[in-house]
Image (cartoon, grey):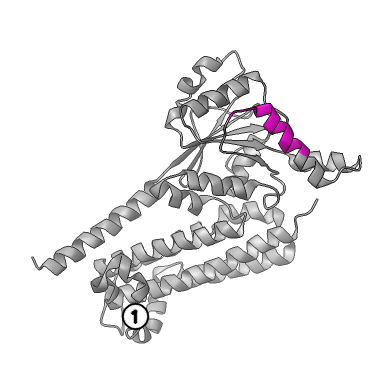
Amino acid sequence: MNPKNSDKTNILKKFEEDLEQYKNAKIKCGIIGRSGTGKSSLINTIAGEEIAEVGEIETTQDVNTPFESNGLLFYDLPGCSTTSFPKEEYIETFKIKSFDCVILVTADRFFEDDLFLIKELVKIEMPVFIVRTKIDFSIERALKRGITPEETQETILNNLKENLGSIDVNGIYLTSADHPNLFDLSQLLEDIFFSLNDFKKERFIADINITSQRILEEKKKIAEKTVMRHSALAAANGLNPVPGVDISLDIALMVKMSKEVKTIYGLDEEHQEFNLQYLDKKTTKFIASKILQYTSRYGGKEAIMILLKRVGSSIATKTASKWVPFVGQAIAAGIGFKMTSWIGKDMIKDAEEIAIAVFEGMKGTESL
């Protein structure tokens, strides 16, 4: 075998393996707290879709079955101060050592058994994130007594620090499910992201809701990686001839690439339905129109084929030098790779435009 062909085969195999690891990556997150603390609302807000039933009474049916959103697995666990789950056996009972992180949720303060559990989690080096939910309610009540929002947040944060004492957790965050872009939710998500490794990092940032500019930027990086991997494989497979262009491409893989980019930016039906509650009618109408345009342009084999025919001749002279360090000169020089990555770049641009409109629209309607 020609050494160059062998190198090319190995590179493509690596991309295929990377794509599979990314798709199959799962992030197991334990959400621990008493009923009524807002665990389900927190799960839904992180995922950006309604995957957990919200209620003031305990709604968890089976603690061993997670709420799932793509690669995100949320285990809604009760506090450890119940007779059913003795604190000394809690970590073993729920197999918490297999988790990637734990979020301890409270709407007030932590009790003695909670503090015991937090210490035990720190001992096993489990990333522990402390979340105080319903901060907006506390602020609204304090405002009636003439206390500013800043004073309220500072007081609650200091109380939690005193409550935790010398326990060294990954962070303390004040959040509100009704105001996902206010307070500390985005910082929580960014800190969880940095606590993960390799493909779990990619999967996590791809699947969480957009609550900050930083998360938007990280999503773009993942989308670009996704386009690069799909482009290399689509060009290599070469299954479908493109009319008018002396090239064959895997069109089905390109359609999958389009769907993946759409999912990364939260433009699928489930995420948009969830975000509607935060948007005004004008923004909602604009977003719906843009998503329809995206789907019409990239959502099927026929649509992709039309794009390929349009751009084939012009892209033949373009370079893909941006990808050379990652895919190698031989792959990047191929017209199939150029065409797929060029269209992928447009997919990202269009999807990001919609996601920014959703994000800005949500910010515009949030106030206390």
Residue at 44% x, 52% y is 202
The residue under the point 73% across, 63% down is 281
**Residue at position x 26%, y 69% from top?**
328
**Extent of the magenta region:** 155-167
Which residue of the protein is positioned furthest toward the top in this rendering?
Answer: 83
Q: Residue furthest left?
A: 1
> Is 298 drawn above or below residue 38 in the view shown?
below
Where's residue 23, x and y in %? 39, 51
**Quadrant of res 174:** top right
Residue that badge 1 annotates: 319
Left or right relative to 76: residue 12 = left
**Of the residues shown, which amino acid type is indicated by label 1?**
Thr
Question: In front: 142, or 235?
Answer: 142
Horizontal and vertical percent position of residue 78:
59, 25
Camera-side residue of 183 and 251: 183
* Residue 325 in which image quadrant: bottom left
* Secondary structure of residue under mark 1: loop
Quadrant the N terminus occupies: bottom left
Q: Is residue 147 left or right of residue 130?
A: right
Residue 125 among magenta residues: no
Q: How many marks?
A: 1
Tell me where residue 14 sits by quadrant: bottom left
Q: Position of residue 295 (x, y in %)?
A: 51, 67
Residue at coordinates 59% horizontally, 55% vertically from top-left? 210
Q: Main secondary structure of the magenta part?
A: helix
Q: Say above or below: 169 vs 332.
A: above
- In the rendering, at what x and y percent does residue 199 appear? 39, 49
Residue 239, can we see it?
Answer: no
> Is residue 357 at all visible to an observer of this figure?
yes
